[in-house]
Structures are given as structure tokens and as C-alpha cells.
Image (cartoon, rainbow, N blue to C red):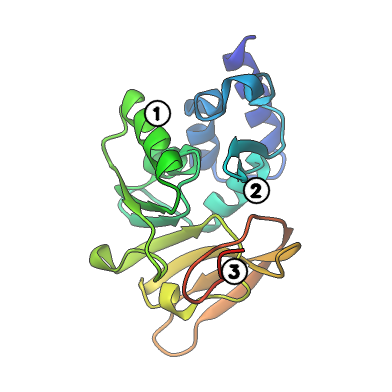
Amino acid sequence: MDFEAARAQLVEQLSLEIKDKRVLTAMARVPRERFIPPDEQHLAYEDMPLPIGLEQTISQPLIIAIMTEALELTGGEKVLEVGTGSGYQAAILAELARFVVTTERFPALAERARQVLDSLGYTNVEIHPAEETLGYQPEAPYDAIMVTAAAPRVPTDLVAQLAIGGRMVIPAGSRHAQELYKVTRRQRKNIVRSLGGCRFVPLVGKGAWEEA
């Protein structure tokens, strides 16, 4: 399969909705097939989520692009990702930001993501085990936070890890259907805006869902 041609075709399709050229360029550079199990690689550039094991998924490319665009990254930011998963979203963020901190609760996924990211030469990504408290406090505050699993509501522990003016994108709602929210932290009242409906695996931890 010609992955490069398929990737270019997908990016052209995404450009109908995504206007941030830096996001499109990042998605044109990162080989999604490398983050997907071998038996699913032929579907790497279909606009759909795919299983990566342990009941986790790599998100639909359009959703990844929408979430990334909403962070408004310009290149100098320190970004937190909650939910490393395959490592693909971390790679996209690493193309667009100065430094990426990402957390993962499944050691096997974290190790696989680390291996792929290292093999692709990403030196500005740091992977940490997820703890009971969401996020990664030692590196806070962050200019942007990307949450790749769904919480029942926007967790205050994560908002507190944003710098003033920082942006967070997070799915929130029930276990089966959510809305995607963009939260901009302000000195007094934070700005919360819906980006539309979505569906993600549950976010597990204090301030989110308990282990099923």
C-alpha cells in the first residue's frame, strides 16, 4: 500500500474543514500507520478510529485535527496530553509545540508509543505513567492541554494545571456520548465553548470515571 499517497489524500480531505495550515502540515508529516497494529495498517488513512489493544483506540483523524486546531499552537508552547494511547496525537503535538508531556495508564501502550516516537526521532516528548490525580503536576502550568478520553465533566484539577490564557480541549458527557469542549483559562471566569458531539473511551482517575 502507498501510505504516502493515502496520507496526502486524507490531508486534502481534512483541509475542507481544517483551516490551520500548520495542523495540516503536521498530519501530512506523521506516519499514522506506524502507530497502528499491523493487521489494521491498511486502514491507517481512512477517516475512522481504530483499535490499538486494551480496549483503547486511535482517534478519527478529523477529530484529532479539530482538537489540535482548537489548541491554537504557534510553536513555543509546553503541552500536556492526557492519554498517550498509540502516541500518534503526541507526535502531532510534537510537530507543533516546543515540548509535550503525555501520561498513559497502560504500561504496554506507553512503552509501545515510546518505541515508535523514539524511532521517528521525536526528542521533545516525555511519557509518564498516569496517576490517580489527572494530568502531571510537576511540569505545570501548561500552555495547552489535550485530553484524549472522556470525563463526566470538565475536571477542575486539569483546569488548574493550565497557565492563564491556556487552552484545554476535552470530551465530556456520559460514557457513551459526549461533547467536545474548549476551555480557555482566565483570571476570573474561564471561557467554555462546545466544538460539537464526539465519542471517546472513558477517562479514568480522580475527578473522572472510576475503573469499570
Residue 177 sits above or below residue 55 on the image: below
Mark 3: give few (<14), some (14-19) or many (20+) Cα within 10 Å.
Answer: many
Identify residue for label 3.
151
Whichever of callouts 2 and 3 sits on the residue coming sooner in the sequence is: 2
Q: Is residue 102 left or right of residue 18?
A: left
Residue shown at 56%/70% (left/top)? 210
Determine the residue positioned at 65% across, 24% down: 40
Q: Whole-percent x and y of residue 64?
A: 59, 46
Q: Percent from the top left, x then y, of residue 120? A: 36, 25
Depth check: give the residue in front, 64 or 158. 158
Q: Amino acid at mark 2?
A: Ile
Q: Residue furthest bottom?
A: 188
Q: Is residue 29 above or below residue 152?
A: above
Label 2 sits on residue: 63
- Residue 79, how many percent across, how many down? 37, 56
What's under tag 1, amino acid-wise? Val
What SS does tag 2 mark? helix
Q: Report the Cα–Cα distance between label 1 and label 2.
A: 22 Å
> Is residue 69 shown left or right of residue 9?
left
Q: Quadrant of the C terminus?
A: bottom right
Q: Is residue 19 visible?
A: no
Which residue does the numbered mark 1 point to in the structure image?
Answer: 116
Disc 1 packing (10 Å; few <14; some 14–19; many ≥20): some
Q: Is residue 33 visible?
A: yes
Q: Amino acid at mark 3?
A: Ala
Q: Secondary structure at mark 3?
A: loop
